[in-house]
Image (cartoon, rainbow, N blue to C red):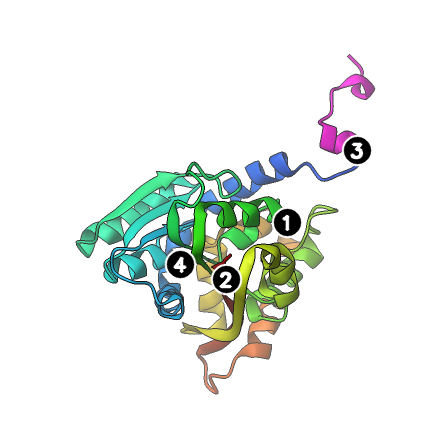
Amino acid sequence: MSISTVATSPAQASGQPDLAALKTRQQGTWASGDYAVVGTTLQIVGEQLCESLDVRAGQKVLDVAAGNGNVSLAAARRCCDVVATDYVPALLGRARERAAAERLTIEFQEADAEALPFKDASFDAVVSTFGVMFTPDQDKAAAELIRVCRPGGKIGLANWTPDSFIGHIFKTIGKHLPPPAGVKSPALWGTPARIEEMFGPHASSIKTEIRHFVFRYRSPEHWLQVFKTYYGPLLKAFGALDPAAQAVLTSDILAQIDRFNRSGDAGVVVPSEYLEIVVTRR
């Protein structure tokens, strides 16, 4: 068989990005390293989101792309009935360990954010922090969040903005390893315009607020070492480059840390802007 006769997917044939293939690669990326090492430092974001949602004891809460369970834990601490989902089983295992250590009851289920295995209107609140924003098919993922949330319920999200520190880290990676053509940037989830586009037709209200998470590390080199070891996107980026290109990427990332760092000493105190969203389902 010649190369020209190898079967292609409908997406490839039409010139559209192959989202299924991209999802498989992304799943491998997030399964690499150990995101829980980074994720656990973001716990305060989950706590703040639950307060902004004003979750109540006894409410049914679904955490989508839960990672190691920051919002799940926060909601369980508030006596909610919580289901945590992710498509990386190892991350759910980390979340399960945390819940057990704190004697919190959470149901864990492997699930794809673009095809949630739940009935319509099953939850009082549907949440995600820095998770669902990375889905390849943004509109499909948003539609699923809406579908499983009951009318009058709330969807709560925390997403990095395009101009945030993490947004610039991804832009820096993109200069070295360009993202697939035709795929929407995850950072669009951190813009009010894109949120209105995806959720507006199904919302009675949308409230957004700019907040900041502060990364605190011993030094810029310490931040980089942790992230290139445990944070899948950075680990994979370095693994795809030769030593000379790795050195350039290292220099570029350290420059971004220096740009945002407000420690005033050898340490890292880097605020990263994110958009907190509370959608009330119509």
The numbered mark, 4 or 2, whose residue comes first in the sequence reads: 4
The numbered mark, 4 or 3, whose residue comes first in the sequence reads: 3
The numbered mark, 1 or 4, whose residue comes first in the sequence reads: 4
Pick the residue in front: 260 or 191.
Answer: 191
Q: Where, by quadrant of the figure, is residue 56 drawn? A: bottom left
Q: Magenta segment: does it hold 3?
A: yes
Which numbered disc covers residue 279? 2
| Visible residue check, residue 65 | no
Residue 35 relative to residue 163: left or right: left
Q: Position of residue 214 (x, y in %)?
A: 45, 74
For marks 1 and 4, give the one nearer the viewer: 4
For marks 1 and 3, give the one nearer the viewer: 3
Instruction: Say if 92 sits above or below 220 in the image.
Output: above
User: From mark 3 to mark 2, how far is it between C-alphas?
Assistant: 35 Å
Q: Position of residue 53 (x, y in %)?
A: 39, 66
Pick the residue in front: 75 or 241.
Answer: 75
Q: Position of residue 107 (x, y in %)?
A: 28, 44
Residue carrying label 4:
39
Residue 15 relative to residue 86: left or right: right
Instruction: Say if 205 sits above or below 235 in the image.
Output: below
Residue carrying label 3:
14
Q: Which residues are magenta?
A: 1-14
Residue carrying label 1:
241
The numbered mark, 1 or 3, whose residue comes first in the sequence reads: 3
Residue drawn 35% across the image and 70% down it: 51
User: From mark 4 to mark 3, how far is it between C-alphas?
Assistant: 38 Å
Element at badge 4?
Answer: helix
Residue 146 relative to residue 119: left or right: right
Q: Residue furthest top?
A: 1
Of the residues shown, which amino acid type is indicated by label 4? Answer: Gly
